[in-house]
Each structure stands twice: as C-alpha cells, then as structure tokens.
Image: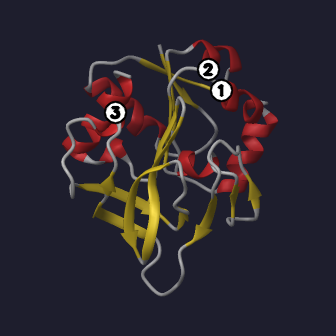
C-alpha cells in the first residue's frame, strides 16, 4: 500500500493521479497506523510551512513521520518540512535533513516557477534519467545544499533540489507535474 500524507497542503490529488497513471493504488491519510504500515509513504505539499507543521503536530504526525522505516518521498513543501528549520514564519521542521530552508533573495523573480534543469549524483531515485532534463518547480523557499543533497539546481543561487538520508528521499521539484521525467522518478521511488 502507498500512503499519501494528508496534512492540509495542496497537490495531494495530482500526486494520487500520477500514481494511478503508473498503475499504483494509494490512500490519502493522516492516520498514524496506516502511515506506519504502508509500503511507501509520499509526503507532498504546496502551502505554508508553519500552518502545515501545526497540523502535523496536532495529529502527532511530527513524531510519526520521522520514525517511518519504509521509503518515504517528500515533494516540494514536503522536502522543506523534512529539513531542520524554515525561514517561512520561523518554523521548526522535522529535522530529517540537516539543513535550513531559506527564502530566495529578491535579486531574481520569486517564486521560482516553471521548468528548470538539475544536476545529480548517481542515486537510485534518478535511474534512467539523463543530465540536464527539465522538471517543474513552484517555490519561494529553498533548501541549502548539504551532505544529503543528491541533486542541485541553480536559480538565483545553487540549492538542493533532491535529498536522501537512509530511507528518506525528497525533491523540491514536482515529479507529478514533470511529464515523463517526473513519472520515471516516481516509478524509481515506487520500485525501491
């Protein structure tokens, strides 16, 4: 079973639709038992960090998500909430990745919205993906590059667009909105 974390953040249905296109069934849930028993967990999100963390904390999911032993994939806000802290409303996050989330400087157009390429290290998440493929972004905050960064993008400045630590994976871009490349990345995750 694939569980999609429900926490009042957007893009949940587009993630579920992408999984359906790939032939996978999924449930949308904020139930701790269902999340812990899932074969894979997807932590999507479009929204604001502090209100998302308040919902996770209210449901006790801030304690549950960090203990998941099966593969978990954070997407966009999901990646940011898996970091230690976000400048967005000075929010303490889950702390899975040892990095901070910062607002893009106003020296360029914010939010970063549209298609952009990334460079990556060898990682099972990117099996079959060639360098310099474009994926879709919508974000005003970015994760600093750190030792768990497995892919980076350059928009105004270099930032971590994908991370991995043990069974935890995350992408700043939206694989569910990134056409064939995004579907391949989701498929790679689902086949881990």
- Disc 3 crowd, CA 10 A, few/some/many (<14, 14-19, 20+): few
| Mark closer to the chain start, 3 or 2 | 2
Query: CB atoms at circles 2 and 1 under 8 Å apart?
Result: yes
Identify whether 75 is placed above or below 90.
above
- Cα separation, mark 1 vs mark 3, equals 28 Å
Q: Nearer the viewer, residue 21 or 105?
A: 105
Quadrant of the image occupied by residue 20: top left
* Residue located at (26% from left, 27% from top): 21
Where is mark 1, residue-wise? 30
| Mark closer to the chain start, 1 or 3 | 1
Apparent side of residue 88 relative to residue 111 in the rendered image (left or right): right
Identify whether 67 is placed above or below 37.
below
Q: Nearer the viewer, residue 20 or 104?
A: 104
Residue 124: which disc? 3
* Residue located at (64% from left, 17% from top): 36
| Mark closer to the chain start, 2 or 1 | 1
* Residue located at (38% from left, 22% from top): 192
Apparent side of residue 64 relative to residue 108 in the rendered image (left or right): right
Residue 35: which disc? 2
């Amino acid at each position: 079973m694939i569980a999609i974390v429900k926490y009042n953040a957007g893009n949940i249905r587009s993630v579920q639709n992408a999984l359906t296109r790939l032939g996978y069934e999924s449930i949308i849930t904020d139930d701790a038992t269902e999340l812990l028993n899932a074969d894979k967990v997807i932590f999507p999100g479009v929204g604001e960090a502090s209100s998302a963390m308040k919902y996770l904390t209210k449901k006790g999911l801030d304690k549950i998500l960090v203990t998941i032993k099966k593969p978990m994939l954070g997407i966009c806000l999901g990646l940011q909430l898996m970091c230690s802290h976000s400048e967005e409303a000075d929010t303490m996050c889950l702390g899975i990745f040892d990095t901070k989330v910062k607002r893009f400087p106003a020296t360029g157009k914010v939010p970063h919205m549209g298609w952009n390429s990334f460079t990556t290290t060898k990682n099972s998440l990117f099996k079959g993906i060639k360098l310099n493929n474009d994926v879709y972004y919508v974000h005003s905050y970015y994760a600093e590059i750190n030792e768990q960064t497995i892919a980076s993008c350059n928009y105004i400045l270099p930032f971590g667009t994908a991370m991995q630590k043990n069974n935890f994976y995350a992408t700043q871009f939206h694989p569910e909105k990134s056409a064939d490349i995004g579907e391949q990345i989701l498929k790679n995750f689902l086949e881990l």
